[in-house]
Image (tube, grey):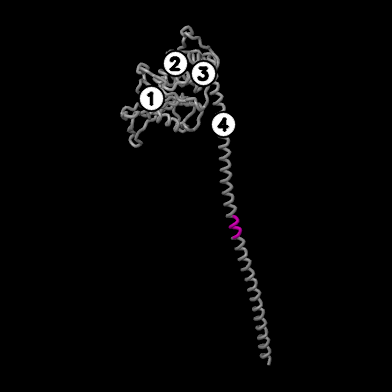
Amino acid sequence: MFQMEHPSGLSPDIFTYYFLHHSKEDLIFMSDNQNNIQLPEHGKLTIPMTNDYLFRALLQQNNKVLTGLIASLLHLSPSEISSVEITNPIILGESINDKTFFLDIRVDLNQNTLINLEMQVINEHNWPERSLSYLCREFDQLSAGQSYESVKPAIQIGLLNFTLFPDHPEFYATYKLLNVKNHTIYSDKLQLSVLDLTQIHLATDEDKACHIDFWASLFKARTWEELHMLSQNNEYLKEASETVYHLTQEEKVRLQCQAREDYYRRMKGIQEKFEQLKQYKAEIKQYEAQKVQYEAQKAQYEAQKVQYEAEKKQFEAQKAQFAAEKIQSDAEIAELKQQIAALKKELDAKSRK
């Protein structure tokens, strides 16, 4: 029976996932002397690999890593990729700000397919619209005189550190333009894909066969122990780990990565305040609704009170009228009694004569 010792300090959830879902060959550790570069054996990563600047720097710095990632995401063999080029590179280490820094990475694959990649850490609740904007920009590529048939396929791939549709979680989802009745694809030149880095446990057999779960776990790794394990028998992940180590040793690159981490913290703080404000507004709205309901009930009560007072007055008037009629009736009865008594007296007097 195949057994593996749990490496000291290794994240238990990552270890358990690989032990349960991958083969013995996938889990064999490389010996340290196989590496030309001696990576730290343990400890936390200086910068998490979900950092969008580090992600961009990694893919821009190492074409082999870019090739391996795209091959996995598109279910291709690396041998099917003859060329891959980032068409909007940045100067690594150069100071950035939110207005000039291109978050998305534009890639020309085999000179016949345009790909847009982006690592998105913060859920700004606009990803569907944002990704569609990226996709349309890539697809809108015709120059004057070109035929529509020459338009290259465009693919947008978002690597998200949050779940886009919480009611329908999925590790790796692909969307295309199709007929809603019979599912006939309208065009195979438009495609959107979403890789949810928080749902690795939902990876399908097809995802695992393409090692997409390996890449997701690489980006989610927080320790060097995890990177050592993930790099076993995978030259692309090994290259990625080594490149990340080199990049994080460069002070200028590290400073820009830390600036992005500061940005995430600020955005998270703003989002938390926004959520608090949203909750406060919801509570105010609920209070206003309750107030309207109370005012309606109060108005109804006042109307009922007015109606009651009117009915009470009517009753009192009827009561007074009844009392007056009773007094009059009593007087008439008393008068009749007197008349009867007088007649009786008169009859008695006549009978005695």
Q: Nearer the viewer, mark 3 or mark 4?
A: 3
Q: Nearer the viewer, mark 3 or mark 2?
A: 3
* Horizontal and vertical percent position of residue 32: 49, 8
For the residue labelled by badge 1, is the local secondary structure a helix, a strand or a loop?
strand
Kindly check if marks 3 and 2 are in contact, taking CB atoms under 8 A apart as contact: no
Tell me where residue 265 appears, x and y as whole percent. 56, 26
Label 1, on which residue? 114
Query: Hey, what amino acid is under mark 1?
Result: Leu
Q: Is residue 205 visible?
A: no
Closest to the camera, between mark 1 and mark 3, is 3
Say if 86 sits above or below 331 in the image.
above
- Location of the N terminus (image quadrant): top left
Q: How far apart, in angstroms, are the residues tagged by discs 3 and 2?
A: 16 Å
Would you say the residues marked 3 and 4 are in contact, meaning their CB atoms lie under 8 Å apart?
no
Q: Is residue 298 left or right of residue 99?
A: right
Instruction: Please name the predominant secondary structure of the magenta segment in the image.
Output: helix
The span shown in magenta is: 301-306
Q: Is residue 183 left or right of residue 304?
A: left
Q: Is residue 219 left or right of residue 333?
A: left
Q: Residues within 10 Å of mark 2 (few under 14, many from 20)?
A: some
Q: In the image, is residue 181 part of the stretch drawn in magenta?
A: no
Picture coordinates of residue 89, whole percent (x, y): 45, 21
Q: Is residue 219 above or below residue 177?
A: above
Q: Are marks 1 and 2 in contact (CB under 8 Å)?
A: no
Front-lying residue, 260 or 219? 260
Per the model, the C-alpha gap separating discs 4 and 2 is 34 Å
Distance in Å between CA atoms under marks 4 and 1 = 34 Å
Residue at the extreme front of the image, as rendered: 144
Q: Which residue is mark 2?
A: 62
Return the mark for residue 93.
Answer: 3
Give the residue type that dot 3 points to: Gly
